[in-house]
Image (spheres, rainbow, N blue to C red):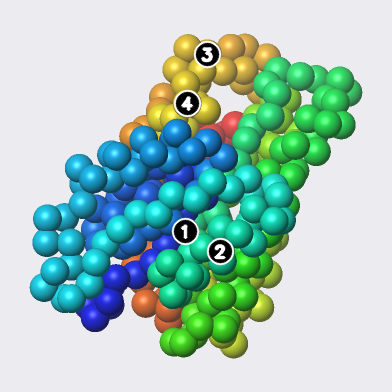
Amino acid sequence: MNAMRTKIAVVTGAGSGIGRAVALELLRTGWSVALAGRRVERLEETAALAEAVLPEEAGAEKGASISSLRVRADVSRPDDVAGLFATVREHFGRLDLLFNNAGTFGPGGVPFEELPYDAWRHVVDTNLNGAFLCAQAAYRQMKEQDPQGGRIINNGSISAHTPRPLSAAYTATKHALTGLTKSLSLDGRPYRIACGQIDIGNAATDMTERMQTGALQANGEVAPEPVMDAADVARTVRHMAELPLEANVQFATVLATTMPFVGRG
């Protein structure tokens, strides 16, 4: 990290799971973080947990300060996203990192032919359109600020590579995120905007809680799956985030070692 100033991050979906773990890891290691999410009470919980992990010196020797900012935002709503990044600009003055994390799996166990359009649309609006809106707002700010540049890390999921059964909406959006990541990596080059993607498998969160009791497999059986600590994912995100802008982790896959991913299907 730049020793002269505190770096600034936006983490979407910061009220729980991977988003919360990443936000806490960044705060613990000297970043200031805008915590974004739909539920203010969950953001407040993350902020309270952050108080316990902030380093005592909190940048005092450098004349810098480390802080968290809670911003209620539904990433599927353009006005919410615009408000989020305007608030970050006003409060912090610049942006060094967007962790594009907010997402939803959608209804589980629904056969493709019975998947309601409204359910499909909700997943697409959150996982893909929300990621686009946040990336576009971050890209604009990173392009305009001085010094120019920054980093965007998209949460892709291992479903960006291989689907689970009955997961068409989720899998389609995660494959699309890979295309967004590649396009941002190319288009951001002239402006020192780096973009990478982390593909995560079975981090222990509310979304994956059912994996430990039984998840539908490609052969039609239901079997429990191992999970890993979300803190292990958070450390990987921080490593990606703290690289100089001349270097980039384009794609990283972090998964529970013995989960059925390699060979899935």
Quadrant position of residue 167: top right
Of the numbered discs 4 and 3, the one sitting upstream in the chain is 4
Q: For numbered disc 4, what is the local secondary structure?
A: helix
The answer to whether 3 appears left or right of 91 in the picture is left
The type of residue carrying mark 1 is Val
Task: Reply above or below: 142 against 253.
Answer: below
For the residue labelled by badge 1, is the local secondary structure a helix, a strand or a loop?
strand
Residue 206's mark? 4
Q: Which residue is mark 3?
A: 214
**Tag on residue 165?**
none
Distance from the alpha carbon under mark 2 to that under mark 1 = 9 Å
Image quadrant occupied by the C terminus: top right
Q: Nearer the viewer, mark 2 or mark 1?
A: 2
User: Which residue does the numbered mark 1 point to in the structure image?
Assistant: 10
Vertical side of 136 occupied by 129: above or below:
above
Of labels 3 and 1, the one closer to you? 1
Distance of label 4 from label 3 (alpha carbons) = 14 Å
Q: Nearer the viewer, mark 4 or mark 1?
A: 1
| Residues at marks 2 and 3, CA–CA distance in whole angstroms | 39 Å
